[in-house]
Image (cartoon, grey):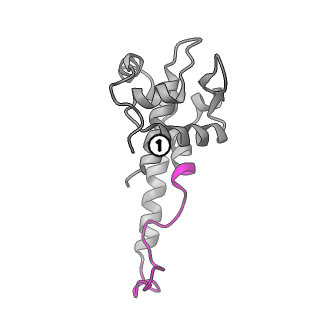
Amino acid sequence: MRLTAFTDVSLRLIMRLAVAREGELLTTRTVATMLAVPYTHMAKAVARMAEMGLVEARRGRGGGLLLTDEGRRVSVGAIVRELEGSGDLASCEGDPPCPLRSACRLRGALREAREAFYASLDAVTVASLADAPARETLVLLQESPFDGEQE
């Protein structure tokens, strides 16, 4: 299974926020440049993670992004399920519809495979993703020469 770019950006955001030092408030722009992601993509990820209650986005002077307690405890499987949705992996009802759809077992097999994928991610928490050795790399990320504006 392949994750969407949006899910990838969202998971990177959560991982970086998981290693933020006490009092370190990163802005959306800063995290976007650290992770070499366009600012607009990161802004959408921040909005969605805030909507899910995983990130707190404080506005104004002294504002920034914080990982919530829920964001630290949540399983990666729960995040991916929410972001990727539960739609079918195969398009059986397209135009024209697949001629095998009435007797095909592929859709069910793909659904089971997706659930097994999610179940394997349920055992992984955001906090565990931010443990060593990833922790050191995440902490050392600096704003890169990438300007965060590219699409």
**Residue 9 image offset from top left, x and y in percent:** 45, 40
Q: Which residue is mark 1?
A: 121
Task: Identify which residue, 122 or 149, lies in the foreground.
Answer: 149
| Residue found at the very far left of the displayed protein | 145
> Does residue 128 appear anywhere in the picture?
no
Q: Is residue 4 magenta?
A: no
Q: Is residue 98 magenta?
A: yes
> Which residues are drawn in magenta?
81-104
Q: Name the quadrant of the C terminus.
A: top left
**Residue 71 image offset from top left, x and y in percent:** 60, 31
Task: Identify which residue, 111 or 37, lies in the foreground.
Answer: 37
Q: Name the quadrant of the N terminus.
A: bottom left
- In the rendered view, does 63 fall on the left or right side of 17? right
Name the image quarter holding residue 50: top right
Residue drawn at x 53%, y 30% as measured from the top left: 28
Q: Amino acid at mark 1?
A: Leu
Residue drawn at x 42%, y 47% as measured from the top left: 5
> Does residue 149 appear anywhere in the picture?
yes
Residue drawn at x 64%, y 26% as measured from the top left: 69
Residue drawn at x 41%, y 34% as measured from the top left: 148
Q: Tally the numbered discs.
A: 1
SS at circle 1:
helix
**Residue 34 image offset from top left, x and y in percent:** 40, 26
Task: Identify which residue, 107 or 17, lies in the foreground.
Answer: 17
